[in-house]
Image: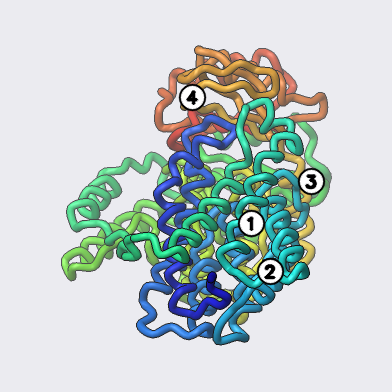
Amino acid sequence: MGFNTIDAKMFAKMFLAGAKNLENKKEWINELNVFPVPDGDTGTNMSMTMMSAAKEVAALENPDMVSLAKAISSGSLRGARGNSGVILSQLFRGFTKVIREYDTINVAILAAACDKAVETAYKAVMKPKEGTILTVAKGAAKRADDLAVAGEKDLEVFIKEVIKEAEVVLSQTPDMLPVLKQAGVVDSGGQGLVEVLKGGLDAFLGKEIDFSVEAAASAPKTGAVSSNIEAQANAEIKFCYCTQFLIMLEKPFHTKQETDFKEFLTSIGDSIVVVADDEIVKVHVHTNDPGLAMQRALKYGQLTTIIIENMRLERDEKVSEMMEKEMQGASVSAFEDTQVPMEHKDTGFIAVSVGDGINEIFRSLGVDYIIEGGQTMNPSTEDMLNAIDKINADNIFIFPNNKNIVLAANQASQLTTDKNIVVIPTKTVAQGITAIINYVPDISVEENEAVMTREAGNVATGQVTYAVRDTMIDDKEIHQGDFMGIGDQGILSVGADMQAVAYEMVEKMMQDDYKLISIYYGDDVEEVQAQKLADKVKAAYADCDIELQFGGQPIYSYIISAE
């Protein structure tokens, strides 16, 4: 005779077993990802989400259903990483809303909880796509409903039948998403959900399982901090003053005037950003003589919102503070509180970024806090919340800069009650840079949100990386070690020559109305290589401004934007 109810103690074991099974299968699940890029993938993101909740569950000594539901929901929400992790956390959020009302749960309650889980997850995604983890969850919930209505009481039969249906729906995902069929895989998020359910069943059946949960990774050792301090102390700052101002134009900038002004700024500095419309020009430059930049700008109109910062002095103060913290035994990251203003202000900015050059660009544009991460490691909702907590501002704009991080940022926004959080849904660092460049202090938060979102959407981005396995995507045969040029809508170019792949990617990206091409080269590319690519692009697109910047990003040799 089977069991008809599950108490909190048993359900805690089932949850921990599900987390363990997912953790054990994460690398296999990563291999199911369609794009063969060297990323933190679906299996990793889902596992880290589950393990965040598992740590809270494991810490409960005598759980009841209320405390267990809270641990699962809170832990998974705050630890959610990537779209798959956020969706998984929303499934748990909906599920636990139902089970928390009961001391024990049976088939009918589980079926209702599955329904609520699917409803909550679908609501969390702006444009739900079928053939994904959502579809697998929906199919499992439908089977659970059918069994409950049919009067099934035996939980072993119920759980096995629900998992069986989930596997059937999972096997159908390639028929729903052609890209899965072409790659010869099922949906990785759906597979992850099935592994969670299977782990839970093993615990229910009494299989011997190690329920222990490893502690969180320890903070960096002092030696790692010392190397970071030494690197920052020895970093060369060629141009000392970060200079920013607005030009209130007397008459609209002509193309030649804008070109001449940029060329002048190039002659006295670097990290140049000039964004012009009919009435205002936003200027950013690193230079040793801010006066020269402003004197030239006065030819075009009046100056306002002038900010000049001594980067060398700020660097020395930061290094001194980091050394003092190390002497006290504190662990320090490269993006610690030294970059966060302590005084209260109206508006703050958070950006997800990776790479010394790109990080510096965001800082120079006014970003208060940089969350280290991106495609290779998606930050969690908890990371977002920690960053929000450190910024003393009423309104905070977040730039996720990756399509797989937007949901986590939105989730952090929903969990924040004491500050107004606005997520600008930037999908690449290039979109993030354009968005913040278009921020105007004198207009409202709502107007800035509209402007930044619109301008970010006008940016096309391509990224060059390498393939970690053989596959077939968009009718392109890809071999391990090939370089791939990945655009906003898919793979644009493939080949063994990185420079050729990058140039072909630009050709596929370009449209007639684009006027600016920005090239950010990664930590594996020499400046001379990048300059050759920039020269070739300039020769082909003479009417466009070409900006070459050191990005320093790992994994992606080039990030190239056009707008």
The residue lying at 45 percent from left, 33 percent from top is 555
Question: How far separated are the C-alphas under marks 4 and 3?
Answer: 46 Å
Tell me which numbered mark, 1 or 3, is placed earlier along the sequence.
Answer: 1
Q: Looking at the image, is mark 1 or mark 2 earlier in the sequence?
A: 2
Residue matched to label 2: 152
**Which of the marked residues, 4 or 3, is nearer the chain's N terminus?**
3
Q: Nearer the viewer, mark 1 or mark 2?
A: 2
Residue of label 1: 161
Q: Quadrant of residue 131?
A: top right
**CA–CA distance in space, label 4 to label 1:** 35 Å
Residue appearing at x 54%, y 70% in the figure: 2
Q: CA distance from mark 1 to mark 3?
A: 62 Å
Question: Residues under labels 2 and 4: Cα distance?
Answer: 45 Å
Where residue 256 sits, quadrant-wise, is top right
Label placed on residue 440: none
- Crowding near pointer 2: few (<14 within 10 Å), some, many (20+)? some
Q: Secondary structure at mark 4?
A: loop
Mark 1: secondary structure: helix
| Residue type for callout 4 | Arg
The circle on residue 277 is 3
Q: Please state if 455 lies on the left or on the right of 101 as rendered.
A: right
Q: Secondary structure at mark 3?
A: loop
Q: Are marks 1 and 2 in contact (CB under 8 Å)?
A: yes
Mark 2 vs 4: CB contact within 8 A: no
The one nearer the camera, 516 or 168, is 168
- Amino acid tagged 1: Glu
Q: Tell me the residue at 74%/66% (across/down).
A: 145
Q: Which residue is labeled 4 in the image?
A: 469
